[in-house]
């Protein structure tokens, strides 16, 4: 009983305990950690076994390589299990990931069996994991090239949109005249999905690349402008009073009071703008720019190269989550005076 | 304006001569005018500590905003050392009920605000530490406002005001939100700072005892629109004791003026 209450309520751990009650109960938490590592090793050995035991139904490469990699990982896990049982903490960093490793090994095994080995999943739409690995090992130059193009496009569009949105938001919050002219335009154009501009943008701009920059900037700019504006408008008026009695100029009120006070809201806007801009990036690449991950995705679909599609999807999600991670890092640094609230 | 550097080198600033001349003020609430101040005529000589007492919502804080130059009065004028007040000026600094520290600035950066706004931060950086020592917060120079207690935050707000060597310190219920023990301590500290620096002080408070302990003069205001009901001189040496028989009788007098004859 004391053992059960001492353990975190992770389902994977609870399941392992149930399977090995005597073992775990006898040597406590340390051997439980070791048991988890052995279970993870078993699940990756299972994957290696599934790959090597049955022949592939189709023509995919890198099966053996994936199997050896899985076996190597299993070996590392066994070593970490032994070390843990012996009381060493050398490979303890693996411990937190171990339940995930068990689940991933099992999932890949099922996926392998269901696609390449027994064809339970409709083919060719669901290629096996080693086919996706093959794309990474054999087509990486094209993938890297696509990522570079996508990152450039996204960064340029986002930076432009963020800069314009921020400036417009600050001006809306501080200038009545600016608000009179710009507010109606913002209300009319802002909510329009940027994709709707696509056909016009592609002939109005000299290149589909510059058109895409414009669309990404537009998508980013709207939420940034609205949230910056609302941040500036909701600054505690007493801040201005205090600053004015201390001798603040108009510029000081904008740059040293309004903008820093609005920054938490600005970052919400940047986050929303960034999320929305990914959709435009991919669409623009599919529709016009003949490069980038979106284009790679569409090209792969055209050739029925489904493994390439999945590989591109994985890269794309890594890229997007990477952008958001960077934004959160910057936010945490800029707003370090706040108590941290969310960990991305 | 007296040169800022000259002020800094002077240990003792001379308080300003504040003259509120027949000031009336009204707000325009959706077309319906609301009279807030009714012909206030009040002169504070340099270095005086004037407390304004009055029922809640009578317009005391509005009067302070006018004196600070944050708004122009509807009628009348306010003159400081012979020059009409037409806008805010760093020689007249405000401390509010809320500390209103900028949360994104450290304690010392908050105190530096006035120096920075006037562009004299480089020349007078040493004043920050000096002023923080005055309010006993040198150890918290690098803390952020959210890490401070209410009393500490209000001390920082005080330091942020004092670092500018004000000629007039405008205090809008600065101790109103503090717990009673912190409040007692800070009443004493404020009086010491005022006696040391020599500025003219204008304090709005709800607390009769606080006014009696701190001020050299208590001005009692009526219900809105506020008019001056009584102007009471408190010529008592500091530190004063709340049990002092004279203060107790004056307290009763003021309670009567405010319409609380039977309260105690």
Image (tube, coloured by chain):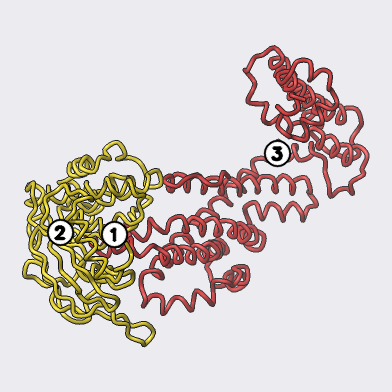
Chain colours: A red, B yellow
Label 1 Cα neighbours within 10 Å, binned few <14 / some 14-19 / many ≥20: some
Q: Position of residue A47 (x, y in %)?
A: 83, 30
Q: Position of residue B80 (x, y in %)?
A: 11, 67
> For mark 3, what is the residue?
A136
Q: Is residue B207 left or right of residue A189?
A: left
Chain letter, disc 3 residue = A
The answer to whether tags 3 and 2 share a subunit is no
Left or right: B204 in relation to A44: left
**Residue A87 quadrant:** top right
Q: Of the residues tagged 3 and 1, which is closer to the observer?
A: 1
Quadrant containing the C terminus of chain B is: bottom left
| Residue identified by numbered label 1 | B207
Sequence order check: which comes first, mark 1 or mark 2?
Answer: 2
Query: Which mark is drawn over residue A247?
Result: none
Q: Which residue is mark 2?
A: B49
- What distance separates the C-alpha of mark 3 from that of mark 2? 79 Å
- State how far apart marks 1 and 2 are (Cα): 15 Å
Task: Farthest residue to the top: give it.
Answer: A86
């Amino acid at each position: 009983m004391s053992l059960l209450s001492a353990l975190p309520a992770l389902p994977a751990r609870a399941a392992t305990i149930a399977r090995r009650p005597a073992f775990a109960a006898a040597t406590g938490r340390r051997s439980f950690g070791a048991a988890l590592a052995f279970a993870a090793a078993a699940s990756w050995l299972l994957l290696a076994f599934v790959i090597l035991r049955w022949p592939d139904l189709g023509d995919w490469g890198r099966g053996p390589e994936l199997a050896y990699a899985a076996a190597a990982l299993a070996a590392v896990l066994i070593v970490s299990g032994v070390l843990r049982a012996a009381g060493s903490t050398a490979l303890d960093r693996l411990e937190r990931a171990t339940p995930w490793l068990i689940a991933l090994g099992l999932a890949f095994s099922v996926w392998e069996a269901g696609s390449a080995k027994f064809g339970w999943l409709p083919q060719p739409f669901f290629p096996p994991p080693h086919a996706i690995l093959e794309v990474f090992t054999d087509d990486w130059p094209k993938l890297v090239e696509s990522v570079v193009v996508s990152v450039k496009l996204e960064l340029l569009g986002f930076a432009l949109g963020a800069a314009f949105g921020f400036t417009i938001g600050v001006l809306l919050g501080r200038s009545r005249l600016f608000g009179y002219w710009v507010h109606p335009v913002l209300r009319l154009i802002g909510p329009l999905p940027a994709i709707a501009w696509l056909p016009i943008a592609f002939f109005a701009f000299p290149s589909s690349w510059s058109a895409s920059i414009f669309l990404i900037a537009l998508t980013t700019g709207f939420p940034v402008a609205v949230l910056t504006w609302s941040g500036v408008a909701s600054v505690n008026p007493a801040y201005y009073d205090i600053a004015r009695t201390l001798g603040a100029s108009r510029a000081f009120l904008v740059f040293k009071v309004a903008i820093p006070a609005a920054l938490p809201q600005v970052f919400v806007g940047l986050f929303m703008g960034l999320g929305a801009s990914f959709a435009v990036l991919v669409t623009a690449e599919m529709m016009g720019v003949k490069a980038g991950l979106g284009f790679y995705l569409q090209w792969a679909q055209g050739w029925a190269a489904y493994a390439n599609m999945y590989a591109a999807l994985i890269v794309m999600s890594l890229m997007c989550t990477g952008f958001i991670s960077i934004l959160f890092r910057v936010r945490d640094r800029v707003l370090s005076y706040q108590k941290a609230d969310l960990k991305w | 304006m007296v040169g800022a550097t000259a002020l800094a080198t002077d240990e003792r600033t001379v308080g300003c001569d504040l003259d509120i001349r027949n000031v009336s003020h009204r707000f325009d609430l959706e077309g319906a005018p609301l009279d807030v101040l009714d012909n206030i005529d009040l002169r504070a000589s340099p270095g005086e500590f004037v407390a304004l007492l009055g029922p809640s919502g009578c317009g005391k804080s509005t009067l302070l905003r006018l004196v600070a130059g944050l708004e122009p009065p509807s009628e009348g004028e306010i003159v400081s050392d012979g020059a009409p007040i037409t806008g805010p000026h760093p020689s007249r600094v405000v401390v509010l009920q809320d500390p209103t520290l900028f949360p994104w600035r450290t304690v010392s950066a908050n105190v530096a605000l006035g120096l920075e706004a006037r562009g004299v931060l480089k020349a007078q950086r040493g004043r920050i530490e000096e002023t923080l020592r005055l309010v006993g917060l040198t150890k918290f120079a690098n803390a952020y406002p959210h890490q401070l207690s209410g009393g500490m935050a209000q001390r920082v707000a005080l330091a942020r005001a004092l670092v500018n060597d004000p000629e007039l310190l405008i205090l809008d219920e600065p101790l109103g939100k503090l717990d009673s023990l912190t409040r007692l301590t800070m009443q004493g500290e404020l009086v010491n700072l005022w006696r040391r620096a020599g500025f003219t002080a204008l304090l709005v408070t709800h607390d009769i005892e606080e006014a009696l302990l701190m001020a050299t003069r208590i001005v009692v205001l009526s219900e809105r629109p506020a008019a001056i009901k009584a102007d009471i001189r408190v010529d008592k040496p500091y530190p004063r004791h709340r049990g002092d028989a004279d203060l107790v009788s004056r307290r009763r007098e003021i309670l009567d003026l405010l319409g609380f004859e039977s309260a105690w």
